[in-house]
Image (cartoon, rainbow, N blue to C red):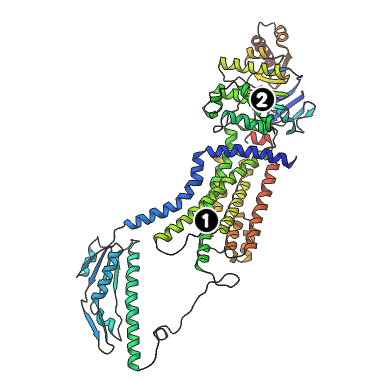
Amino acid sequence: MKPGKIMAEMKVLLWKELTDLKRDKKTLFTSILLPLLMLPLMGFIGFALAQEQIINVAVVDLDHATAHNRLLNITFSSGWLLGNITYYLAKYGYNYTVSNSTSIIKNPSIDLMIVIPRGFAENATSLTHVARIEIYRKAGLQTTGRVEGLIYSIVNWFSDQLSKEKIMALARLAGVNATIEALRNPIIYTTTIVSISGSPVNTAFQIRVTISRFLVLALSFVVTPAASYVIDGIIGERERKTMELLLSHPVKPSTIINAKVIAATILGLITAIADAFGLLIYISLSAITYGSQAPFLVDPWLLLVHSITAFFTILVTVAISLPFITRTKGIRSASNIMSIVTMMAVVFFFTALFVDYMRLPTYILAPLYVIPYVHSILAIQTYVIGYSFQAFLHILFLAITSTAILYLTTKTLNTEKLLMSK
Amino acid sequence: MVVEDLHKIYDNKVHAVRGISFIVRKGEIFGLIGPNGAGKSSTLRMIVGLIRPTRGRIKVMGIDVVRHPVEIKKYIGYLPEEADVYDRLTGLEHLRFYAMLRGLVGSELEKTIEYGIKLSGLEQSALKRRASEYSKGMKRRLLLASVLMTRPRLAILDEPTSGLDVYASVNVRKMIKEYVGETGASIILSSHNMLEVEYLCDRVAFIAHGRIVVEADPDRIKQMYNAVNLEEAFVKAVKEADRM
Ligand SMILES: Nc1ncnc2c1ncn2[C@@H]1O[C@H](COP(=O)(O)OP(=O)(O)OP(=O)(O)O)[C@@H](O)[C@H]1O
Ligand SMILES: [Mg+2]
């Protein structure tokens, strides 16, 4: 048969599939709008709710003292620390009470208590003692951790200041030339993140690597709608009694099935892109709300690689399930088989969040190569750190596998099998 | 169109068609009548090339159906017994889709659709609505029009008027008769309606248990069974077949 004729038929069949899909608002909504809105919405709701939480903090100053070290000429007051703590608690919207007694922690409405013990100022200015702040947190509350973080940074700042003042005072007394860091941290280390070719990379690159892990995970949300679309397209056409008339036209059954596969893959691809954009919106939103300077990182090449990988991941999923779909009776049993295949995909995509697949030893990775989804993961993971050629090979593997399975499956198809369920 | 010693066994169990042979000439309307499960639909599906005969030969215009299942469909139009519309396509889109599936383009395509519209007898406003909103009769007429509009040399219609009311059935019958008059094509149809068969068919075959019991023109059959109408002849013929 002439390729031109098949292409023309494919065009007609695709026109029908896509016209139908365009009018199928439910499918469009669940497979495109939902993934686009889901992640940002979840992020937004999470943030908005976090804002509304009420946390009650008690601050107890048992010291009430100002101490002065005459030798070093350093002064410190528990009131300064108290003032700073209450200032920042108020600034970040936490309720607080200043109390004189630690028994306030018995009050059920108090979630966290900060205690400045007796002798605090004295110890803070001494050369022999360490001053201590005590924090009491009620178990089971997520947000108290954030208050603790806030206190930690305030305490750290004071600690740092005092340490500097003490070191400089001692150096002055000894009449030696000293720098603070050389005395406080004589040994330090530095880390430079470099690319595979050894040149330093910026933060944007690192964020990209993190994003890519979520992109792999996002593939899980793409395979399912595409797969159910194919099931519905093939078994549904039989059940809705449109299959027989369709098959009576001078078109090869394989062309009909392939058109459905392509329509499903197009749907999947749109879902994948919607997913990726949802992820980017989410990241940008959280960057804005948490005040970090992560820019709106739309990396067109990463998106392209993601889309191509998504395309073939869907194709391979559909190809694997096709022999089962065309041989089962109803939509339900076909869906069951499909969900086994998609579950497998989801499990692998999930592990990719914390497993660097290209660093697995050969005796583990080699057998895993049989699983197409491992190539989807590797395509994105290798691309994002700079191995473009390897990424290309993994995509090529996906492309060849899916086309081969599709070819073999559709070759054995005939109208009788498609028409009659076994 | 020649059918020779056709057999169909489903799943190595159900022997649905047991040696059917007949010929349909150009411009002829041939009717298959038989009780439920007699093997009418199975026979028609084999002629269209949708299912494979277990044994036997089918030639349409000299072409072997089994060996050229795709090619043969260019000459055949087939209306399945249970056929439905695509819910989200309009009537007009149905006609366009099926015409384009036969490789028609340009003015030929438009002319075909035009003829389809005429055959369907549907109003322009109806054609622009989604087919899911059609009544059963409108759906059947639309699908029959889509089958006939490309002027297939052989049209195979499996119970074209099943489920239709009297008025809609009369319409469909007129449509079939006019079509043959205009195009000189051949038609094979199956039916449970004796009036319909008597009105439409040049020749009729009674089928029971996968075999042809009798085959002749309607008048001749009435004479053979000494019956006033085809229905009476049919009842007698089937009783005879059951006894055998
Ligand atoms: N796919 C199938 N698998 C198994 N048996 C089948 C199948 N299709 C039909 N049959 C059987 O073959 C026999 C003939 O069926 P067929 O549909 O050809 O009869 P029919 O004459 O068209 O009947 P009706 O008047 O009810 O449409 C029946 O016994 C039926 O149960
Ligand atoms: Mg039938």
Q: Measured from the top left, where is residue B159 in percent x and y?
A: 63, 21
Structural distance between the alpha carbons of marks 2 and 1: 51 Å
Residue named by callout 1: A217
Examine the image and state in which quarter residue A4 appears.
Answer: top right
Q: Residue furthest front?
A: B107
The answer to whether A138 appears left or right of B36 in the picture is left
The 10 Å Cα crowd at callout 2, few under 14, some 14 to 19, many 20 or more, is: many
Q: Is residue A200 above or below residue B130?
A: below
Q: Quadrant of ligand 2?
A: top right
Q: Which mark is residue B149?
A: 2
The answer to whether A295 appears left or right of A252 in the picture is left
Q: Quadrant of the N terminus of chain B?
A: top right
The answer to whether A285 appears left or right of A192 in the picture is left
| Residue type at the position of mark 2 | Met
* Closer to viewer: mark 2 or mark 1: 2
The 10 Å Cα crowd at callout 1, few under 14, some 14 to 19, many 20 or more, is: many
| Residue type at the position of mark 1 | Leu
Say if disc 2 is inside 8 Å of ligand 2: no
> Depth check: A122 or A72 in front?
A72
Examine the image and state in which quarter residue A411 appears.
Answer: top right
Residue drawn at point x = 38 percent, y = 56 percent: A47
Q: Measured from the top left, where is residue B146 in percent x and y?
A: 64, 26
